[in-house]
Image (spheres, rainbow, N blue to C red):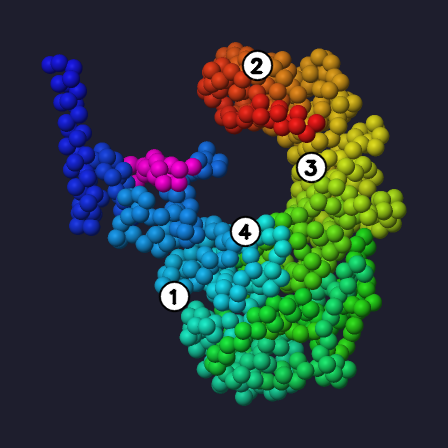
């Protein structure tokens, strides 16, 4: 038989199968059950011909038949999205990746489902069927996505998101009208208060709308003035209404059993009435339950004069009885006396709404704008002896704190402020809040401080490039109040900004003094504030205040080219016996002995230190200290990033580094990016894995080191020789090669990478070294 005939004969079965598979795919509605029962080899050929609707439904059948759908979803991604996803090598489930991105694109009108036949199925509802796979969602611009999701026809979509969504992001937001904000309120209430969202992130908002910003922050913290928020719909939240109906009967029976006394109200009960007047009384009741120690936020009392607090007093405030007390004299049902537990994952019930669905468009404005004016003295339960004992401590600045008392913020007694947070009900709240590139004014910081003071579910707070300056004191005051709550879970604080209002070490000391339970602290600044005139030597609070013992495990400090004074780091290390990771970035060493002193302090005060990192710290003249670090038996990971290690070194120094690492059996990771290793030093590093080595080094990072393809190939050959000498067994598993000159000889680089990947996992990129060099020249 001729070759063409054989080729045709071999092609006919495939063509017949393709025709049959195409016919089956068009009739999946009738044949679906029979198709799922097909053997694996037939199912494998049929799956690529299915629409997204049936491909998603085929997952269980494919798994039973031992067929993976991942290649099909991956091809679908590239066919439809027409772009390479970021970090594609780390994607473990292309099905989820595709459907999650598909949901976002359809929601924002970026993708037309008619553009590909696999997306065009009359049984397929794009938002409904992809929503169960969405764990992260970004809303942007005018919040058109929020309006669409809050619409009645997407009720089921919102229900799916409430169970699947974990991260909610807001990006490039713009001001919006009242109707859009109402839709956003409904969305946040369902996804956060009655859903599973655990992280809210906001970024890139150069001129934030104060109303919108504080609204998102308040609802993320679990607060919601729900009386009129749902007036645009015919009924309150269905999840809340189910409990309201049962509770209203209990309220009617037990309301008469309780007297109308202010003392009983202050014990923490909540009034629930049906009339408009009684609902307003509820709006002025205290949030904290009787079983929870009441919180007082000293944010305003401890704010410096640079951030004055503008309490809004009610007219007639000198009266012995405030208007809030007058409104609050109502029977309180015993059943509502429950401790608030806004833990992530726990559904938070709504309190009963007013039966009169009164719609006042100004309600949302009133609620949002008065959060910042909250007078926290109302949160103090004056009937509790324990609270009274601690009042003075809570309202005074702790040693080392940047916050100092402000005369205008220490009013006592009479009514002050509009009790907006008390007017709001408390629901489930998120555990992570991130604010990136959003300027925070003094008013917004006071509002955030008030929210933080009782945000007991909050575990992670990230404030990045918010222009805080002196307002950092107000934020710390709210966190200090939060840390005293017995259910506080706050563990991670990351603060980064362009300018530092105070020396980095002073800020670190103040944070640790206020938050001894903190596990991770990251402080990062680009430049020193030109108005900053104080230094650690001039500030007595920085040098004399004693830091209480802390739980700190990770400390990261990026200095704005400040000198690293070990004397000021010493109290921090002494108080942090559990410290496991220390990172020092962009610090200058004031004298040659400073680094040696730091190593002595670390050895004495940080016995549990496992990871030590230096970035952009000039270590060219500290070869002795570098070798001491490399032989430390306690360290498992050491990073010298852009530290100019070999700027003035000799060949003997490199040999000493290699021999030291070879003898250290505890070091697992060595990161040397940006130290101008070049080809010859990279090749020499291969001797770390020689036959006489006792090293346990698993990871090596040589990114940004001017490495060329021929040098990488020589390193690979030398490494292969050592592996052969050791019987094919070495601990080395990961090599990072970012931003090296591997594009200068593509063939040699590919050969080196191919041989390296047979030995270890290699992570590199397609970096254009010529363009990078041109950029470097352009800014010289």
Compute the Cα span from label 2 to label 3: 31 Å
- Identify the residue under disc 2: 711
Residue beneath disc 1: 152
The answer to which of marks 4 and 3 sits earlier in the sequence is 4
The label number, if any, that marks residue 583 in the structure image: 3
Which of the marked residues, 1 or 2, is nearer the chain's N terminus? 1
Mark 1 falls on what kind of element?
helix
- Chain part drawn in magenta: 63-83
In terms of secondary structure, what is the magenta stretch mainly? helix
Within 10 Å of disc 2 (Cα), the crowding (few <14, some 14-19, many 20+) is many
Query: Which marked residue is nearer to the observer: mark 4 or mark 2?
Result: 4
Whole-percent x and y of residue 619?
75, 26
- Between marks 1 and 3 in the image, the one whose residue lies nearer the viewer: 1
Q: Secondary structure at mark 3?
A: strand
Whether residues under marks 1 and 2 lie with C-beta atoms below 8 angstroms apart, the answer is: no
Q: Residues within 10 Å of mark 3 (few under 14, many from 20)?
A: some
Q: Residue 679 in magenta?
A: no
The residue sitting at 68% across, 82% down in the picture is 323
Q: Between disc 2 and disc 3, whose residue precedes?
A: 3
Residue 303 location, quadrant: bottom right
In this figure, which residue is indicated by the disc labeled 4? Answer: 171
Q: Earlier in the sequence, mark 4 or mark 2?
A: 4
Task: Single out the mark in the foreground, 1 or 2.
Answer: 1
> Is 78 one of the magenta-colored residues?
yes
């Amino acid at each position: 038989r001729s070759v063409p005939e054989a080729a045709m004969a071999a092609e006919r079965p495939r063509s017949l199968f393709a025709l049959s598979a195409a016919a089956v795919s068009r009739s999946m509605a009738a044949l679906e059950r029979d198709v799922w029962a097909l053997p694996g080899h037939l199912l494998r050929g049929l799956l690529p011909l299915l629409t997204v609707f049936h491909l998603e439904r085929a997952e269980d059948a494919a798994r039973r038949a031992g067929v993976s759908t991942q290649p099909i979803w991956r091809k679908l991604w590239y066919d439809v999205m027409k772009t390479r996803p970021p970090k594609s090598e780390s994607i473990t489930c292309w099905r989820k990746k595709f459907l999650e991105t598909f949901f976002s694109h359809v929601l924002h009108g970026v993708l037309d489902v008619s553009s590909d036949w696999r997306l065009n199925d009359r049984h397929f509802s794009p938002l409904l069927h992809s929503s169960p796979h969405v764990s992260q969602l970004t809303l942007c611009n005018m919040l058109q996505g929020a309006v669409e999701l809050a619409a009645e026809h997407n009720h089921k979509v919102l229900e799916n998101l409430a169970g699947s969504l974990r991260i909610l992001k807001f990006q490039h937001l713009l001001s919006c009208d009242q109707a859009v904000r109402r839709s956003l309120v409904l969305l946040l209430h369902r996804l956060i208060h009655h859903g599973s969202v655990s992280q809210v992130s906001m970024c890139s908002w150069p001129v934030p709308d104060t109303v919108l910003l504080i609204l998102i922050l308040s609802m993320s913290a679990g607060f919601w003035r729900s009386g009129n928020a749902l007036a645009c719909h015919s009924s309150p939240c269905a999840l809340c209404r189910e409990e309201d109906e049962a509770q209203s009967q209990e309220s009617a029976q037990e309301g008469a059993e309780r007297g109308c006394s202010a003392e009983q109200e202050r014990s923490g009960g909540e009034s629930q009435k049906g009339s408009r007047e009684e609902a307003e009384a509820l709006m002025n009741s205290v949030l904290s339950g009787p079983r929870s120690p009441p919180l007082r936020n000293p944010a305003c009392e401890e704010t410096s004069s640079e951030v004055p607090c503008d309490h809004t007093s009610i007219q007639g405030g000198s009266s012995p009885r405030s208007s809030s007390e007058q409104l609050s004299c109502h029977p309180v049902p015993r059943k509502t006396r429950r401790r608030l537990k806004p833990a992530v994952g726990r559904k938070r019930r709504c309190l009963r709404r007013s039966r009169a669905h009164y719609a006042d468009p100004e309600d949302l404005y009133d609620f949002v704008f008065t959060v910042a004016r909250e007078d926290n003295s109302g949160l103090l339960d004056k009937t509790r002896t324990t609270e009274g004992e601690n009042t003075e401590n809570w309202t005074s600045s702790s040693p080392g704190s940047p916050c100092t008392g402000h005369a205008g913020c220490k009013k006592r007694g009479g009514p002050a402020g509009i009790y907006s947070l008390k007017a709001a009900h408390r629901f489930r709240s998120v555990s992570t809040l991130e604010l990136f590139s959003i300027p925070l004014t003094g008013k917004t910081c006071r509002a955030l401080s008030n929210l933080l003071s009782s945000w007991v579910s909050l575990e992670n707070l990230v404030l990045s490039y918010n222009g805080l300056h002196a307002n950092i004191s107000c934020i710390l005051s709210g966190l200090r109040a939060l840390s005293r709550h017995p259910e506080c879970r706050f563990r991670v604080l990351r603060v980064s900004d362009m300018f530092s209002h105070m020396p980095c070490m002073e800020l670190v000391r103040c944070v640790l003094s206020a938050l001894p339970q903190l596990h991770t602290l990251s402080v990062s600044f680009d430049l020193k504030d030109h108005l900053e005139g104080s230094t650690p030597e001039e500030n007595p609070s920085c040098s004399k205040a004693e830091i209480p013992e802390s739980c700190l495990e990770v400390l990261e400090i990026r200095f704005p080219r400040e000198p690293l004074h070990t004397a000021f780091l010493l109290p921090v290390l002494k108080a942090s016996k559990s410290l496991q990771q220390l990172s020092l970035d962009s610090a200058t060493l004031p004298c040659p002995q400073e680094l040696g002193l730091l190593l002595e302090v670390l050895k004495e005060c940080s016995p549990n230190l496992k990871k030590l990192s230096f970035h952009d710290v000039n270590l060219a003249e500290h070869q002795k200290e570098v070798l001491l670090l490399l032989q430390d038996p306690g360290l498992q990971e050491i990073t010298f990033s852009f530290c100019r290690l070999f700027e003035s070194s000799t060949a003997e120094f490199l040999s000493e580094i290699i021999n030291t690492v070879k003898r250290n059996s505890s070091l697992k990771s060595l990161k040397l990016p940006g130290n101008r290793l070049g080809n010859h030093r990279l090749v020499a590093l291969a001797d770390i894995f020689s036959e006489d080595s006792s090293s346990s080094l698993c990871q090596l990072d040589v990114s940004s080191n001017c490495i060329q393809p021929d040098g990488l190939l020589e390193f690979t050959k030398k490494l292969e020789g050592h592996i052969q000498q050791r019987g094919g067994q070495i601990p080395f598993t990961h090599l990072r090669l970012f931003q090296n000159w591997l594009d200068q000889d593509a063939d040699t680089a590919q050969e080196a990478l191919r041989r390296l990947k047979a030995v270890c996992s290699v992570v590199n990129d397609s970096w254009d070294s010529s363009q990078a060099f041109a950029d470097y020249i352009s800014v010289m």
